[in-house]
Image: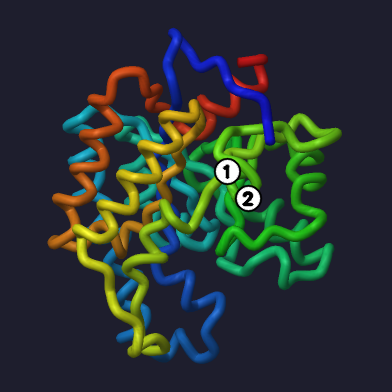
Amino acid sequence: MSAAVAWPDGARSAACLTFDLDADEVWLAEVPNAARRPGVLSQGVYGPNVAVPLLLEVLGRYGVAATFFVPGRVAERYPEAVRAVLDAGHEVAHHGYTHRAPASLTAQEEEEELARGIAVLRETHGVTVRGYRAPSWDVSVRTVELLQRYGLAYSSNLMADFRPYRHTGSDVVELPVHWTLDDAAHFWFGQTAWTRKLATNEEAGAIWRAEAAGIDRLGGLCVHTFHPQLIGRPGRLELFEDIVRAVAEAEGVWAATAAQVADWVRGGG
């Protein structure tokens, strides 16, 4: 277990609101023949085209800066959505070039994905990425060394703690995640999962509030992971606003982007 973090200005704990802006890339990269299935892809198209503006409005209303992890191919296909995120003052970070998990790739393929994603975000939007989240959080044994070599400051993929920590022998900071705080665990549904029950807002909200309260008591970092196509549905916007409001108004909780947290930890916080 990592050591306790002394958060800025005497804060008790920290919170990051993060988004995986997968759009339709999650199917295009992983599902055979997805490009010929517009009904499947439409679930993801909703994310950048409809959900992102709705979510940005809520974040802006409460003055909370978030981190959006964006695959390179999404940045290429939906530049307006990525530009809107940047113009609203949020961080854009690396989420692969395609939405293929590093653990399923060869060493050469993983490095090519990392390098190409960095290049695309720089070339399309002028972004110098600071951090990385693997598709499906499924990193390989090579990933941290690659991030160090390419100069990235943080990873947000592992579940070994509820506090940030430096990887052994590396400058890369890990910002831990967990399925408990991921909306996909509660709301993901599609043609290949018809038997699955969708959680109600009340069920998901109770789980998120309990986990956030526990992390706060123990002085950790609460990393919420949202997918615009899921949390940005009309019936879930009120639930999302509840989370944003709680982060913005909680006394003793430092609300920050992933890069801000990583910089604080790297600086000895």
Rendered residue at 30%/86% (across/down): 39
Q: Of helix, strand and loop, which one carries label 2?
A: loop
Residue 4 can be seen in this image:
yes
In the displayed structure, 23 sits above or below 132; it is below
Q: Quadrant of the C terminus?
A: top right
In the displayed structure, 154 sits above or below 100; it is above
> Is 234 on the left or on the right of 120, as rendered?
left
From mark 2 to mark 1, how far is it between C-alphas?
5 Å
Question: Residue pushed farthest top?
Answer: 9
User: Residue 10 appears in which quarter of the rendering?
Assistant: top left
Q: Of helix, strand and loop, which one carries label 1?
A: loop
| Residue ID for mark 1 | 176
- The chosen color scheme is rainbow
Residue 119 can be seen in this image:
no
**Residue 188 percent coordinates (x, y):** 36, 72
| Residue nearest the observer in this picture, 75 or 236 | 236
| Residue ID for mark 2 | 158
**Residue 234 percent coordinates (x, y):** 14, 61
- Amino acid under label 1? Pro
**Residue 261 percent coordinates (x, y):** 53, 27
| Residue nearest the observer in this picture, 14 or 139 | 14
Rendered residue at 19%/43% (across/down): 241
**Residue 231 percent coordinates (x, y):** 27, 58
Rendered residue at 20%/30% (across/down): 62
| Residue nearest the observer in this picture, 55 or 214 | 214
Classed neighbour count for the residue bearing mark 1: other residues with Cα under 10 Å, few (<14), some (14–19), many (≥20): many
Mark toward the start of the polypeptide (2 vs 1): 2
Contact between marks 2 and 1 (CB within 8 A): the answer is: yes
Classed neighbour count for the residue bearing mark 2: other residues with Cα under 10 Å, few (<14), some (14–19), many (≥20): some
Rendered residue at 83%/63% (across/down): 107
- Amino acid under label 2? Leu
Q: Quadrant of the N terminus?
A: top right
